Amino acid sequence: MKIENLCVKRLIGDVSGATTRGHKIAIKGGYVYQTFQGGYTLTPLGWSVVRKIENIIRDEMNAIDGQELLLPVVCSADLWRETGRYDSMDNIAKFKGRSGADYVICPTHEEVITDYARSVLTSYRQLPFMLYQIQTKFRDELRVRAGLLRTREFIMKDAYSFHETQEDLDKYYKRCFDAYYKLFKRCGLKNFVDVLASSGDMGGKYTHEFQLITDMGEDTLYLCDCGFRANKEVVDVDNAVCPKCGKVLNRVRGIEIGQVFQLGKFYADSMHLTYTDANGDEKTPIMGCYGIGVTRIMAAILEESSDDKGPVWNMETAPFAVHVIGLNGKDTRVLELAQNIYDDLIANGIETVLDNRDVHAGEKFADADLISAPIRLIVSEKNLDKNVIEVKYRVNDFDTEKLPSCFDIKNCILDVKSTIEKLLHK
Ligand SMILES: [Zn+2]
C-alpha cells in the first residue's frame, strides 16, 4: 500500500471529544470513525487490526476443539420468548417486520445456539462439543460512554459448550480459561487478570471475567495478595476485606475483555434441548459460554500500549509488518531503492506500506508512529553511500534493544523475514 492511497484520515495535533488516551489515539490514527453515538466504522487500518485479533482468537478456539459457525444477527422474538428473556432483558433492540412479526437484533446468542443444538443433538456420543462465532452484536444501551470501551454495536466472539456431566464442563472451562490467557497475551496485552464476577442476565452459577487493569477502566476490581480477585458485584464493598484471608483488599480499575460462564441447564431446560444417554434415558446437557469483546481488545491494547505519538502494536496485531520510508522525496536513487524494497517485500507476501511522498521527514515519521508497523526501514542518501538501510522498531511485547539498527541493502529482504519471525516469538 502506498501511504497516499490509504483511505484513512490521520490527524495532526490534539483530538477533541475523546475521553481516554486509547480513544484519542484511535481517532488521531484514523483507526475508527464515529458513524453514530455508540457506533463506529472500523476504517481499513482499524479493520485490519480487528481481523488480526479475530484470527488469533480463531487459532486458540480451534486449538481447544471449537467449531466455528455463524448465527443470524436478527432473530425471531419467539426464540427469546421461550426463555422469557424477550421481556426480562432491557437492552434488546426489538422491531416489527412488515408482516407484523416481532424480531430482535441479538444482543447475545444463547437462545439461537440452543435452538441450533436441538436440531443436531440426539445422542451422548456427540458430546462434548463447542461452537463459536465471531459476529456483530447490538445492545440498545440507554447511555453510552463516549469512546470505544462501551459501544452499542460491537464485534464479539461468543462460544458455547455442551456437556454430559458437571465434571466434563469443569474440565473444559479450565481449558478455555488457559486458552484465554494465551490469546490475550498473543494480542500484546500485559496487565490482565481473571476475577470472580456475578452472572447477571446470563443465568448460571458462577463466572469469571478477564480484566485489563488500567485507570481508564470502568469496572472496579478488588485484588488480594493471597490470590483472591473479584469485581465489586461479588465483594462486600462496605468493608472491603478478603473473604479468603481477611486482609484489606486493593481496589483497582479494569476493562473487561472477556468472560466465561457456567450456564448450567437453564437454556437447555427452557428450550427442551435433550439427548439420549448410554442407558437410553433422556437427559439435558450442561452448558458453558465464553465471550470475548473483539473490538474491545483493540481498544484495550490502545489504552495499555500507546504513547503520545500513537499506538504500539505487536507483530501479530499491527496493520502492516513493515513501513518503508524514502527520506528524501527528491533524490531519485532513494526513491527507486525504497520502491524496489517495497516491491520485493510485497512479492514475498509481507504486508508493507511505502512512504515516498515529497513531504517533510517529520510528517513521515508522525504518520509512521500512527500506523505503527513494528519494522520501519528508512532509506536515505546518507545511508545509501554505506550500502545500508536504517531500521527502527515499534512493538509492545519484544525487547528490541538487541535487534540490528541497520540492514545491508543486499540482504534486506532476508533480514526483514528473520526479524519478523523473531518478533512473532518463533
Ligand atoms: Zn486474601
Image (cartoon, rainbow, N blue to C red):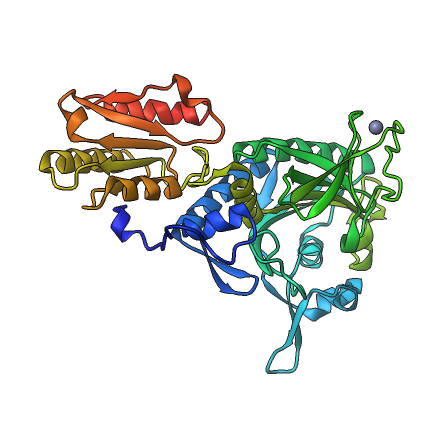
The residue depicted at 80 percent of the width and 25 percent of the height is 226
List x then y, in percent, for residue 78: 72, 69
The residue depicted at 43 percent of the width and 33 percent of the height is 315
Camera-nearest residue between 16 and 367: 16
Instruction: Report ligand 1 position as a quadrant.
Output: top right
Camera-nearest residue between 220 and 140: 220
List x then y, in percent, for residue 323: 30, 37
Task: Please indicate, yes or no, whether residue 179 appears anywhere in the rendered image.
Answer: yes
Q: Is residue 125 left or right of residue 152?
A: right
The residue depicted at 18 percent of the width and 25 percent of the height is 383
Relative to residue 384, is residue 57 depicted above or below? Answer: below
Camera-nearest residue between 322 and 16: 16
The residue depicted at 85 percent of the width and 46 percent of the height is 281
List x then y, in percent, for residue 190: 58, 31
Relative to residue 292, is residue 244 depicted above or below? Answer: above
List x then y, in percent, for residue 261: 74, 44
Q: Which residue sits furthest bottom?
A: 99
Q: Is residue 423 left or right of residue 78?
A: left
Relative to residue 405, is residue 7 depicted above or below? Answer: below
